[in-house]
Image: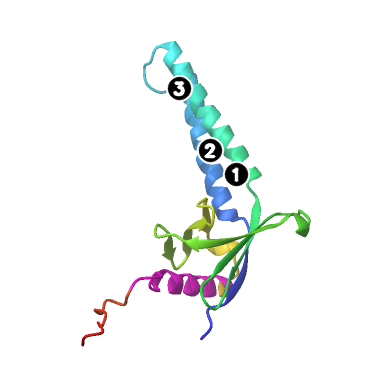
Amino acid sequence: MSIAVSVVLRPSRILIACTLGMCAGVFAIGLAISVDAVGEMPAPIRLILAFACIFAAIFTAIHAFRDKKSHLIDISENGQIRLTEDVVGAQPSTASTVLVELMAGSTLWPNLLLLRLQTEDRRTISLRILPDSVDQDGMRALSVALRWIANRPVRGETDGLPEKSADT
Protein backbone atom coordinates (compact mmCIF):
# COMPACT_ATOMS: atom_id res chain seq x y z
CA MET A 1 0.00 0.00 0.00
CA SER A 2 1.31 3.44 -0.93
CA ILE A 3 0.89 6.39 1.41
CA ALA A 4 1.62 8.94 -1.31
CA VAL A 5 -1.01 11.67 -1.07
CA SER A 6 -1.51 15.06 -2.67
CA VAL A 7 -4.30 17.16 -1.15
CA VAL A 8 -5.39 20.78 -1.59
CA LEU A 9 -6.50 22.42 1.67
CA ARG A 10 -9.00 25.25 1.40
CA PRO A 11 -9.76 27.72 4.22
CA SER A 12 -12.38 26.21 6.54
CA ARG A 13 -15.74 27.97 6.53
CA ILE A 14 -16.63 26.26 9.82
CA LEU A 15 -13.55 27.72 11.50
CA ILE A 16 -14.23 31.20 10.09
CA ALA A 17 -17.87 31.03 11.27
CA CYS A 18 -16.84 29.92 14.77
CA THR A 19 -14.20 32.67 14.94
CA LEU A 20 -16.68 35.33 13.85
CA GLY A 21 -19.25 34.05 16.39
CA MET A 22 -16.66 34.33 19.12
CA CYS A 23 -15.75 37.84 17.94
CA ALA A 24 -19.40 38.89 18.03
CA GLY A 25 -19.69 37.61 21.61
CA VAL A 26 -16.55 39.42 22.77
CA PHE A 27 -17.71 42.60 20.99
CA ALA A 28 -21.09 42.38 22.77
CA ILE A 29 -19.33 41.91 26.11
CA GLY A 30 -17.21 44.98 25.37
CA LEU A 31 -20.34 47.02 24.61
CA ALA A 32 -22.06 45.76 27.77
CA ILE A 33 -19.06 46.74 29.86
CA SER A 34 -18.84 50.16 28.21
CA VAL A 35 -22.46 51.08 29.07
CA ASP A 36 -22.01 49.83 32.66
CA ALA A 37 -24.47 46.96 32.22
CA VAL A 38 -22.03 44.46 33.73
CA GLY A 39 -20.43 44.79 37.15
CA GLU A 40 -19.57 47.87 39.14
CA MET A 41 -16.22 49.28 38.11
CA PRO A 42 -14.72 52.74 38.12
CA ALA A 43 -15.15 54.52 34.79
CA PRO A 44 -11.48 54.43 33.66
CA ILE A 45 -11.12 50.68 34.31
CA ARG A 46 -14.50 50.00 32.67
CA LEU A 47 -13.55 51.95 29.54
CA ILE A 48 -10.12 50.32 29.28
CA LEU A 49 -11.64 46.85 29.64
CA ALA A 50 -14.39 47.66 27.12
CA PHE A 51 -11.85 49.03 24.65
CA ALA A 52 -9.67 45.91 25.05
CA CYS A 53 -12.63 43.61 24.34
CA ILE A 54 -13.80 45.58 21.33
CA PHE A 55 -10.26 45.90 19.95
CA ALA A 56 -9.62 42.15 20.37
CA ALA A 57 -12.91 41.30 18.62
CA ILE A 58 -12.24 43.58 15.65
CA PHE A 59 -8.59 42.53 15.32
CA THR A 60 -9.48 38.82 15.37
CA ALA A 61 -12.32 39.26 12.85
CA ILE A 62 -10.03 41.13 10.44
CA HIS A 63 -7.34 38.47 10.87
CA ALA A 64 -9.87 35.68 10.19
CA PHE A 65 -10.80 37.28 6.86
CA ARG A 66 -7.22 38.14 5.84
CA ASP A 67 -5.81 34.67 6.49
CA LYS A 68 -7.44 32.95 3.50
CA LYS A 69 -4.60 30.82 2.24
CA SER A 70 -4.91 27.52 0.49
CA HIS A 71 -2.21 24.90 0.90
CA LEU A 72 -1.11 21.90 -1.10
CA ILE A 73 0.25 19.00 0.93
CA ASP A 74 2.29 16.42 -0.97
CA ILE A 75 3.33 13.32 0.96
CA SER A 76 5.72 11.00 -0.89
CA GLU A 77 5.87 7.22 -0.49
CA ASN A 78 8.75 7.49 1.98
CA GLY A 79 6.87 9.97 4.19
CA GLN A 80 8.48 13.21 3.03
CA ILE A 81 6.05 16.14 3.32
CA ARG A 82 6.11 19.12 0.96
CA LEU A 83 3.90 22.08 1.76
CA THR A 84 3.01 24.63 -0.89
CA GLU A 85 1.38 27.80 0.35
CA ASP A 86 -0.72 29.65 -2.18
CA VAL A 87 -2.90 32.66 -1.47
CA VAL A 88 -6.41 32.05 -2.83
CA GLY A 89 -6.78 33.74 -6.20
CA ALA A 90 -3.06 34.46 -6.63
CA GLN A 91 -0.91 33.44 -9.59
CA PRO A 92 0.70 29.98 -9.33
CA SER A 93 4.16 31.56 -9.74
CA THR A 94 3.83 33.22 -6.31
CA ALA A 95 3.50 29.88 -4.50
CA SER A 96 6.32 28.87 -2.15
CA THR A 97 7.12 25.20 -1.52
CA VAL A 98 8.93 24.05 1.62
CA LEU A 99 9.98 20.67 2.91
CA VAL A 100 8.45 20.12 6.37
CA GLU A 101 8.53 17.52 9.12
CA LEU A 102 5.59 16.49 11.32
CA MET A 103 6.27 17.54 14.92
CA ALA A 104 5.32 15.59 18.04
CA GLY A 105 2.62 18.02 19.22
CA SER A 106 0.33 17.35 16.25
CA THR A 107 -3.24 16.14 16.87
CA LEU A 108 -4.63 13.54 14.47
CA TRP A 109 -8.32 12.95 15.12
CA PRO A 110 -10.77 11.49 12.56
CA ASN A 111 -12.50 14.82 11.80
CA LEU A 112 -9.84 17.28 12.93
CA LEU A 113 -6.14 17.48 12.13
CA LEU A 114 -4.06 20.04 14.00
CA LEU A 115 -0.66 19.84 12.38
CA ARG A 116 2.53 21.29 13.77
CA LEU A 117 5.07 21.26 10.97
CA GLN A 118 8.71 22.29 11.17
CA THR A 119 10.65 23.57 8.18
CA GLU A 120 14.33 22.91 7.51
CA ASP A 121 15.21 26.33 8.96
CA ARG A 122 13.38 25.42 12.25
CA ARG A 123 10.32 27.60 11.57
CA THR A 124 7.04 26.18 12.88
CA ILE A 125 3.88 26.15 10.75
CA SER A 126 0.50 25.28 12.27
CA LEU A 127 -2.34 24.00 10.10
CA ARG A 128 -5.94 23.39 11.17
CA ILE A 129 -7.69 20.92 8.88
CA LEU A 130 -11.44 20.49 9.35
CA PRO A 131 -13.74 18.28 7.24
CA ASP A 132 -14.84 21.19 5.05
CA SER A 133 -11.22 22.03 4.12
CA VAL A 134 -10.79 18.82 2.11
CA ASP A 135 -13.08 16.37 0.34
CA GLN A 136 -13.97 13.22 2.30
CA ASP A 137 -11.60 10.88 0.45
CA GLY A 138 -8.76 13.39 0.73
CA MET A 139 -9.34 13.75 4.48
CA ARG A 140 -9.22 9.98 4.95
CA ALA A 141 -6.09 9.53 2.83
CA LEU A 142 -4.33 12.45 4.52
CA SER A 143 -5.24 11.16 7.97
CA VAL A 144 -3.90 7.66 7.19
CA ALA A 145 -0.65 9.02 5.71
CA LEU A 146 -0.05 11.36 8.65
CA ARG A 147 -0.74 8.58 11.18
CA TRP A 148 1.78 6.40 9.35
CA ILE A 149 4.37 9.18 9.49
CA ALA A 150 3.66 9.85 13.18
CA ASN A 151 4.01 6.16 14.13
CA ARG A 152 7.13 5.27 12.18
CA PRO A 153 10.43 5.13 14.07
CA VAL A 154 12.56 8.26 14.00
CA ARG A 155 15.86 8.03 12.13
CA GLY A 156 18.53 6.57 14.38
CA GLU A 157 15.99 4.92 16.69
CA THR A 158 15.93 1.15 17.01
CA ASP A 159 12.81 -0.94 17.15
CA GLY A 160 13.31 -1.66 20.85
CA LEU A 161 15.48 -4.76 20.31
CA PRO A 162 19.00 -4.82 21.68
CA GLU A 163 21.65 -4.46 19.02
CA LYS A 164 23.76 -7.52 18.31
CA SER A 165 27.42 -7.12 19.05
CA ALA A 166 30.21 -8.61 16.99
CA ASP A 167 31.16 -11.11 19.80
CA THR A 168 27.80 -12.97 19.85
Residue 55 visible at all: yes
Give the x, y percent position of residue 168: 21, 88
Give the x, y percent position of residue 113: 48, 62
Nearer to the camera, 43 or 128: 128
CA distance for labels 3 and 2: 15 Å
- Amino acid tagged 2: Cys
User: Can you say whether 110 is above or below 31 in the image?
Assistant: below
State left or right for residue 33 relative to residue 17: left
Q: Which residue is the site of mark 3?
A: 49
Q: Which residue is the site of mark 2?
A: 23
Asked if the magenta segment contains residue 154, the reply would be yes
In the image, the segment drawn in magenta is 138-157
Q: Are marks 1 and 2 in contact (CB under 8 Å)?
A: yes
- Amino acid tagged 1: Ala
- For residue 120, the mark is none
Nearer to the camera, 28 or 142: 142
Residue 35 visible at all: no
Q: Which residue is the site of mark 1?
A: 64
CA distance for labels 1 and 2: 10 Å
Q: Quadrant of residue 85?
A: bottom right
